[in-house]
Image (cartoon, helix red, strand yellow):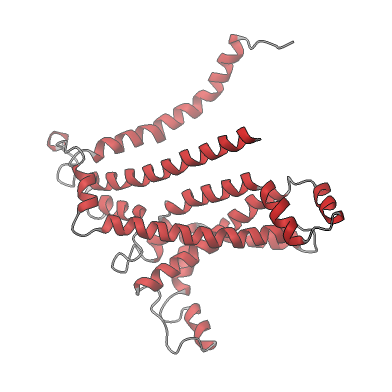
Amino acid sequence: MKKKNSPALGRVGLLFALPAVLYMMIFVVYPMFQNFILSFKNVDVYTFANPAKQEAVGFANYIELFTGKDGILGKAIINTLIFTVVSIFFQFFIGFGLALLFSKKFRGSAFFRGVTMISWLLPVTVAGLLFKFMFASKGGIVNQLFMSLHLIDQPLEWLLEPGLAMTAIVVANIWIGIPFNMMLLITGLTTIPEEIYESSRLDGASKIQTLFQITIPMIKPAIMSVLTLGFVYTFKVFDLVWVMTKGGPINATELVSTYAYQLSFEQFQFSKGAAAANILFLILFAVGIFYIKLINDEEEVM
């Protein structure tokens, strides 16, 4: 016999949820709403303190960002996609390999798994400064290592040449994100019953067959979560890039997040900065909707 939920229990549940709802409304929904309104106005350093002079311009800010002569937004979007895809690719495969390794029980596995988490636990700004010094032209450990291995004859300008600068920030971001991928995938691996592996061994399945026919299909939800969350976290990266290159040289590492920051807080074009931030939000919102649809389709199949 099913028990009916009393109205009193429903009201108690709403009261428990009320603080979280209020927090989201005040610190998330309201700022987002104001940011969208700001993007449809012409607000700069001269009109910021005088609302009477803040005229509505419709989609003019968005049109100017996409059709501007400098073309920085288009380049920032392409840079962000390259930065995100390359970072996720290496983060996932290295993290997956480490997850397979540390899911096994061997002496020192817990210790080494904890050591691997250091890069994730470090503040991003600290990690950015660390890699900035490592990739320094003079005295940087990367140049010293490559020269000692006779791979290069003279120090490379890692953070001053466009192609090398993007490589440097991608390497830094990969190092930071590997533990996140590893831990989520280890969690997924622990949900696979050991009996399934024992049965596959009795049937004569090789390790490669076990990996592709048992392990990967059974942790597919965890893999989807890792890839989607990794895309969101990487696409909106700001602090690492800002500390290492500030979007330079010559916009070679300019991301949508750093471009929005520069427009708002360095050039004081607040409306254009808000428009750039909204573009970033809409891209991530579309990814979130896609992820929810995938999860719902997966649950329907199961």
Position of 216 with respect to 201 (left or right) is: left
Q: Quadrant of the C terminus?
A: top right
Q: Position of residue 41 (x, y in %)?
A: 19, 38
Residue plotted at (80% across, 62% down): 106
Position of 98 with respect to 255 (left or right) is: right
Residue plotted at (65% across, 52% down): 185
Q: Position of residue 183 (x, y in %)?
A: 64, 52
The quarter of the picture where residue 113 lies is bottom right
Residue 268 visible from this viewpoint: no
Task: Return the residue found at the far left.
Answer: 53
Position of 193 with respect to 5 (left or right) is: right
Residue plotted at (48% across, 58% down): 124
Q: Nearer the viewer, residue 130 or 165?
A: 165
Q: How many marks?
A: 0
In this rendering, the answer to whether 133 lies above or below 272 is below
Task: Return the residue found at the far right.
Answer: 202
Q: Nearer the viewer, residue 247 or 283?
A: 283
In this rendering, the answer to whether 216 lies above or below 281 is below
Residue 65 visible from this viewpoint: yes
Residue plotted at (45% across, 81% down): 139
Q: Quadrant of the N terminus?
A: top right
Q: Position of residue 69 (x, y in %)?
A: 18, 58
Q: Nearer the viewer, residue 68 or 248?
A: 68
